[in-house]
Structures are given as C-alpha cells and as structure tokens.
Image (cartoon, helix red, strand yellow):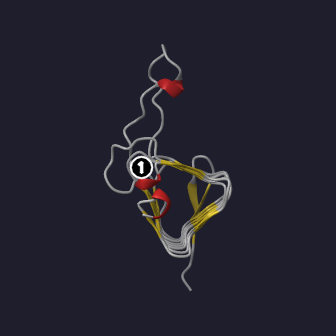
Amino acid sequence: MAGGFRSFGDGSRILLPTRIANPDKISVGAGVLIGAGSWLMVPSRDEPGPVIELHDRVRMRGASISAVRSVIIEEAVGIAAGVYISDHSHGFDRSDMPIRDQPLTEPRPVRIGRGAWLGQNVVVMPGVTIGEQAVIGANAVVTRDIPPRTVAVGAPARVVRELVSG
C-alpha cells in the first residue's frame, strides 16, 4: 500500500498541492494523473474496501471527489478543472442548525464510464451514472444518468447530441 493508498498503480502521479483524506479508502490505477489543486475526500472510515476508485489512465486537474460509499471513475476518463463529484450531500431539513452541521443524505453510488470527458466546472450529483465516452459540457450540473456516447450540457444537464460511431 504505497503512500497509504488502498492501491496505487505503476506510473501514477500526484502533483502538489493536493488534498487527500483517508487514502486507505482510495484505489488508484496505473498511469493516473491527479493534478495540482485536486481533492480526494473520504470523510468517513465506515465503509469497507475502496470508496473512491480511479481506474487506469484517469486524468484529473484541480477537481474534487468526495465519497462516503462509492465513486468509481473508469479507465481513461478525463476530468477538467473545477469538477465536483459526490455520492452524498448535506441534509437541509432542520431550521435550527446550519446546513453544514446537518447529517449527510443517504449516499448513492456514482459511476463515470470508460473514456468519458467532464468539462470545466461540471458538478456530478449523487446516484448518477455517466455512460462510456459521454461528453459533459462545461458548467453542467448532472442530476440524472447520461447515456453512453452522448453530449450533455446545461443545468440540469440534458442530452443534446448522440455521438456517431466511426
């Protein structure tokens, strides 16, 4: 277990500054680049096994991933600066306490499919699956599943185009 990570693949690099919490709950594949300014946050140690999985050849720059139960980023996914991915959020039902102090919502797994691209400042909400080779346009907020080989934009993100194989 190199550097405290659950696993850390050959040829992977972390550029500083980077913030990492509970690296023993994070699995990093081979040839991964975690760029400067990135955050990998596992706020709880309750779940067994890796909670954040970055498969081979994932590239992220200045992005944040926060997971309580499961965020899986499959092979060769590109993640631009300012992207935020989480499998949970804070509750906001109680008026007698600040939002940040309220319990987390029930985590729902997130999966980003092989070869997908997430543009600048994309937000991926809990429970979302983004299909293989999907493209998510800059500043999109992904609140529901995105099919493979499509382009989605907007807030909330909606599919605007299918990518033709060829």
> In screen coordinates, is 103 left or right of 39?
left
Q: Is residue 92 visible?
A: yes
| Residue under the point 53% across and 20% down | 98
Image quarter (top left, top right, bottom left or bottom right) of the C terminus: bottom right
Residue beneath label 1, please? 127
Image quarter (top left, top right, bottom left or bottom right) of the N terminus: bottom left
Q: Residues within 10 Å of mark 1 (few under 14, many from 20)?
A: some
Which of the two residues, 20 or 163, is positioned nearer the viewer here? 20
Residue 88: image location, x then y, percent:
45, 42
Residue 124: image location, x then y, percent:
53, 51
Extreme-top residue of the structure: 96
| Residue under the point 41% across and 35% down | 105
> In screen coordinates, is 119 left or right of 24?
right
Residue 86: image location, x then y, percent:
49, 47
Q: Is residue 94 above or below residue 43?
A: above
Q: Is residue 41 above or below residue 75?
A: above
**Amino acid beneath label 1:** Gly
| Residue 7 image-quadrant placement | bottom left
